[in-house]
Amino acid sequence: MIKFLRYTEYLYLAVAVISIYKVVTLWSIDPKETYIFIFFAVVSIAMFLFRRKYRQRFEQRKKDNQQQ
């Protein structure tokens, strides 16, 4: 399960990178359309950080339980 959590973290980063790419390419054409991609990028980065912290906490708890 931990491997799955690791992959989902990087999935969020991939969504952020794609969103940032779309912002850069669409900004000169229609700036109003890029706001949704900016939102996706920010939310994806926040979810990446949240999931990473959650996974690390889960791994630490599992490690502590094995040592006891």
Image (cartoon, rainbow, N blue to C red):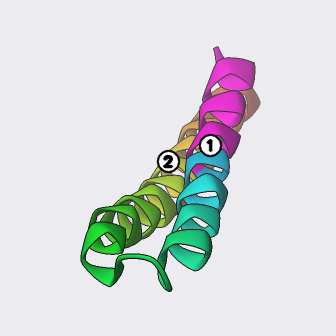
- Compare marks 1 and 2 and give the one earlier in the sequence: 1
Q: Is residue 8 magenta?
A: yes
Give, as a three-letter code, the residue at label 1. Answer: Glu
Tag of residue 65: none
Q: Quadrant of the C terminus?
A: top right
- Identified by mark 2, the residue type is Arg
Q: Residue furthest top?
A: 1
Mark 1–mark 2 contact, CB under 8 Å?
Answer: yes
Q: Disc 1 or disc 2, which is closer to the eye?
A: 1
Q: Is residue 42 visible?
A: yes
- The crowding category of the residue bearing disc 2, from other C-alpha atoms within 10 Å (few below 14, some 14 to 19, many at least 20), is some
| Residue found at x 70% / y 34% | 6
Residue 55 or 15: which is nearer the viewer? Answer: 15
Instruction: Check the image and report above or below for 36 versus 54.
Output: below
Q: Which residues are magenta?
A: 1-12
Q: Is residue 34 left or right of residue 4?
A: left
Dot 1 crowding, Cα within 10 Å, few <14, some 14–19, many 20+: some
Callout 2: helix, strand or loop? helix
In this rendering, is residue 53 above or below 55? below
Residue with the mark numbered 1: 9
Left or right side of 68 for 39 = left
Q: Nearer the viewer, residue 26 or 12?
A: 26
Q: Give the x, y percent position of residue 63.
A: 71, 36
* Residue shown at the point (50%, 64%) measured from the top left: 45
The residue wearing badge 2 is 51
